[in-house]
Image (spheres, helix red, strand yellow):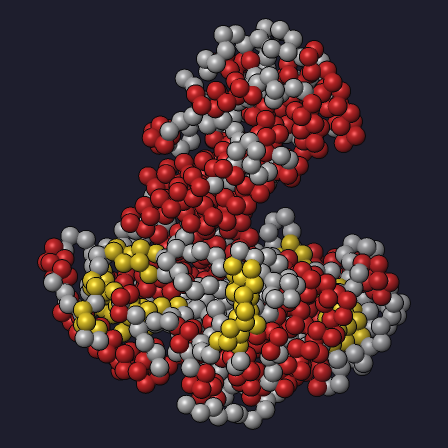
Amino acid sequence: MELQLPERGSAHKLVNEEVVKNALFSQGLEKAPGTDLLNFRAIRLLWNLDSERVVSLTRQCLRLGIHPRVWKTAKGVLLRKNGKTNYTLASKVIEKLVAELITNFAEAQDLFHDGQFGGHRQRSAIDAVACLVEEIHQAWANRKLAAALFMDIEGAFDHVILAKLVEVLREASVDGDLIHWVISFLSDRRVTLVIDGHVGKEVPISSGLPQGSPVSPILFVLYVHGLSRAIERSVPEVRCLSFVDDQGLVTAASSVKEACRILEKAAEVAIEWGVANGVQFDRKKTEAAFFYRRHRRQVAQNVSRARIRVGGELATVKSTVRWLGILLDSQLTWKSHYNARIKTARNTIIRLNSLCRANGLPPALVRRIQKATVQAQLLWGAEIWWQGQKTWTQRIQILINKQARGITGMFPKTPIGALIREAALEPATVLMDARVARYTARLLALPDTHPTAQILPVTLRHGDLHAQPGEQPLDDREWASRDNKVLNRLGQRLAKHLAQRLNRDPSGGIERTEQCELQGFPGSIRVLDKEEALTEANQQHAGTTFWSDGSRLDTGRAGAGVTLQAVPEGPWEHVEVPMGHGHEVFDAELVGVATALKWALERQPLGPIWVLLDAQNAIDRLRSTRPGPGQALVLRAHKAAEKLALRGQPVTIQWVPGHSGIEGNEQADQAAKRAASKQTAPGFEHLSLAHVRRACTEARRAAVSEWAQINAVQGRHRDGRVYKMPRGWNLDPVAGKAPKRLASRYYQLKTGHAPIGTYLYRIGQRESPECQACKEPHETVRHVLFECRGRRAGRRTLYQALKKAGVPLPTAAEENPEARLFAEPRATQGLLQFVAEANLFNDNERTAREAESSDAWGWDTLEEGGLGVTLEDE
């Protein structure tokens, strides 16, 4: 196929400092360097030195439609992956920028199929599976069975034909600058392989999209965007769901035979479209599954005899099928997926054991690895399958306990309250509930047109306060029931889970967003250094200056205030907007900016318009119209600023330090507080998305606190052991960076489960609890820290460190001073120095190893203990 070049476009005019900076700083620093050995940290340093040159280079690449050849030579480092024969390459900043520009255009022109969940913003693999599950639940609600055919595009990126891709982009009216750049990017590419540090020769690559490039997924999605539309147009009974190259065709039918007929026809259309567009499907990965309610024996028998012919071959029909990393069984019990997650996470913990030993990594690094691997594997898809199953909770908690021991080095019988707190992990129930709540809050922030947002009931999203009879479905309020019944449909279950965490009635609806063209603020935004901002705030600006602020009282009521001093030394004018409950300071700050600009339109003052406020998060939100919290207020502010600009009055939004004695800021603050105390103004009956997120966060903290109170060991215990839970729920930063051997002893002493006399005597590892260093009859934590004559040198170091840190020294009259010190973050450094110098290793190392061995509990024993137990000796 011959390349047909389009005319030059204007995309290069969109390249400015902001978009290039976003493309650069959104890349991870850990990405592999290219052949020039410069990673993103080095490129960011270049940006700080000469950002104008980087912007100019990027702009000219798009204007000329050139991707320099030196950037096309990728370095492929061979990393063995199970079952994989191809390997990813590094990417560059300009590729990320082009991907953003193409995505913005495609979204504005509605080029993406609604069922495509890969390659562009606000979509994920979990979203695709959630839509599939909702389709199945909808079929069951209509007394039908659901069936799905899963097809995988063979080769995917490797088989993309450049001429065909250019034709697709031209037909979609993609800007000519971008198309010319894509042609250059995919032409004359080369790769050099690096094996064990040896760099090979450059080899030309003649086809496909480069693996690992940020622009490849969006180009591939556009390349195949016609596939799903062709299937749904020819077979309207089928809904197409896909994630880049993984296709899922789902239908509802009255019988197995009907479902087979529909899916066969859909597969035929897919193959025909593929032949016409140079796309092939991997027959070995084509699988089918049927989903039906329990206790339908006849259906099960019919499914066992089902035959679905795809391209002349029979597709494999499975009772449990894997799609996008989630195992779906025929009745959606999730047991297979849950067991697979547990097994995978347990195996990962075993592999990480060598990093968690006494000579292993510091606790903070171990924690990062544990969360990035074990928890990520364990919780995959929990947004969909978690329903509060108690028996599942126990096994998850056991794995979390194991993680905590790997992080802290504590003994297995340490009380789990102290264990989980010191490792800064969360208990299983809290962790899972928070994940589901966070996912539901994310869905609420999506536009109503987003397919995943439509999973949630309309009575939650829009509210039913003013709904007319027949306007909303009759069965759409199951989520509002107050019982603990687990609802059948995914959307209803998610809505109920979230509603239980809201402290306000959502009948007025929740803030809505819309899909719109992404635009920057039509004016100037200035965030200066504090000193410079203070200086400018006290100066008189040319034009008219409005001061804006938002406030939220302890009662939960919010309000916005805007002030104006029209004449120097003149009276202050105020506008107050009472917002009532269900809104946050973030919302109030945006309301203040929108109100100020509206006021400027109504007053028609002369000269430029300035709006000064002290909330940087609100100012950052004004930079973009992207969907999310505060979008409606941002759009209002943008429209007002555009109208003012048309009148010749440019708008500047500027940050001013709050509570710095600046009169305008103080006047706005007082106006906002007065507004918050007044009766709610019309238009604020809904809950804001920021408020929903805050409610989820508060519910999470309350659940953690409640769990801690039940499971944390408080007060004095036998053998004089005392543990006081520190404030907050973060890993101690000092202990987290300490050598693992040292940090482990610190944590052990902190909980009293340490290789000292009283503990070793209690578990049968010593004949008496006496101190080996000074022969006192009872070696407790208090004795080790403050009384032992054999550890005086270490004690002197401890007391010097405490004085330096400003921590009160222990006194003879103080009860449990050791608990106070271990709960005081400022004392951690001194305690670690004490552990290092007080001979807590040499004389106890052998006994400690024996204690760890005899103190170890197996998986079965831990499972018998269940949740909420203190792992103590009876």
Judge by depth and name the residue closer to the eye, 718 or 320. Answer: 320
Q: From this viewpoint, is residue 681 visible?
A: no
| Position of residue 825 measured from the top left corner of the image (x, y, whole percent) | 67, 34
Q: From this viewpoint, is residue 849 visible?
A: yes
The residue shown at (81%, 66%) is 572
The residue shown at (42%, 85%) is 164
Q: Is residue 158 left or right of residue 234?
A: right
Q: Is residue 308 left or right of residue 870?
A: left
Q: Which quarter of the figure is the N terminus placed in?
A: bottom left
Q: How many marks?
A: 0
The residue shown at (75%, 80%) is 650
| Position of residue 224 measured from the top left corner of the image (x, y, whole percent) | 39, 78
State whether residue 351 is above or below residue 656: above
| Position of residue 658 measured from the top left corner of the image (x, y, whole percent) | 76, 56
**Quadrant in the rendering for residue 225:** bottom left
Q: Which quarter of the figure is the C terminus placed in?
A: top left
